[in-house]
Image (cartoon, helix red, strand yellow):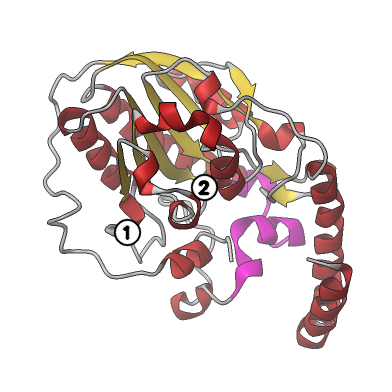
Amino acid sequence: MTFTDWVEETRRQVRQDGWQGVQDSAYKFYVGTFRRLGGVWNFGTPIYEEDWDMLVVLDACRWDLMAEVAQEYDFVDEEWTYSVASSSAEWMEKNFRPSYAAEMARTAHVTANPYSEQKLDPQSFAYLEEVWKHTFDRDVRTIPARAVTDAAIRAGRERDHDRLLVHYMQPHHPFVRKPLDKGIPRDEFSSTPWDNVWHKLRRGQLEYEEVWDGYRDNLRYVLDDVALLLENVDAERVLITADHGNLLGEYGLYAHPDYVPLKPLKRVPKCVTSATDEETHTSDTDAETATDVEEVSRDEQLKHLGYK
């Protein structure tokens, strides 16, 4: 966004929202100062510079959030690393580059993140399944973890690959079991991008403890499925990490704006474990036969997830 664009957007927001529009516009300008820094400086380790047979990517998972539940799961620890990005689209840009073409060609990639359509080339991978294209729960407005687990198990058992990459959508909001946006009419949700959980926290409409509790529960929700995945695929070395974290007020920022090189946002889990296929679970459907899901566009899904 250029300065002229920002001025025009500010005028529109002030006309529409009054003083709140002034605050929101000032916040956008403030975020932009950090993005300009990100344009000239960055840090973090690309995923193909790590050693793994299966990479499990949690979406928007802070390292300290994972540390809080470490005692609840035998495959979780308190180790961490820095992601190369502060948002999902940026993470895809910086990890799936031509310099890693050989590694990508040997990777089966299962993803729930709708940015895959504009950032990933299916021909670059041994196999690419975009779960969001065939499974989207309109009631909770996200891609269920079980659909990703099922797709990953199928890929692990049926596809020819050297590596398996599994990208879940949680703990990214909306919080599946403890929704904090239930007061927003469903038919208006996609048109109110400022009303997701992080924006409500910034505005003081939600308490920090309430948001953190829902965020942590959403992590437990997806880790329960990761546990199921680990006993239904074979992988000698499994790395569990995240594409980025979230800001909850550090530096006056919230959520995960792209190209913002701040340590609290880019510090993510790095849990090392293994997986053995004990055949405790079998998927009932696959991408070709799923018939119980509604057609939802990528843009609509991104809006539901707070990206647009």
Check contact, mark 1 vs mark 2: CB within 8 A: no
- Mark 2 secondary-structure assignment: loop
Q: Quadrant of the C terminus?
A: bottom right
Numbered range of the magenta stretch: 192-211
Judge by depth and name the residue closer to the eye, 101 or 93.
Answer: 101
In this rendering, which labeled residue sits more in front, label 1 or label 2? 1
Give how far across and how far down residue 176 sits, in percent: 41, 52
Q: Is residue 298 left or right of residue 203?
A: left
Q: Which mark is residue 80?
A: none
Q: Which residue is mark 1?
A: 133
Residue located 61% across and 34% down the image: 62
Quarter containing the N terminus: bottom right
Disc 1 to disc 2, C-alpha distance? 18 Å
**Label 2 sits on what residue type?**
His
Identify the residue shown where x is 62% and y is 27%: 64
Residue assigned mark 2: 172
Which residue is pictured at 75% across the width and 62% down the height? 203
21 drawn magenta: no
Q: Is residue 106 left or right of residue 234?
A: right
Q: Residues within 10 Å of mark 1 (few under 14, many from 20)?
A: many
**Residue 144, horizontal then vertical, whole percent:** 33, 50
Decide: is 222 above or below 2. Answer: above
Q: In the displayed image of the protein, which residue is found farthest to the bottom?
A: 15
Residue 93, x across and y down, in percent: 58, 44
| Nearer to the camera, 192 or 285 | 285
Kindly state the secondary structure of the residue where label 1 is placed: helix
Give, as a three-letter code, the residue at label 1: Lys
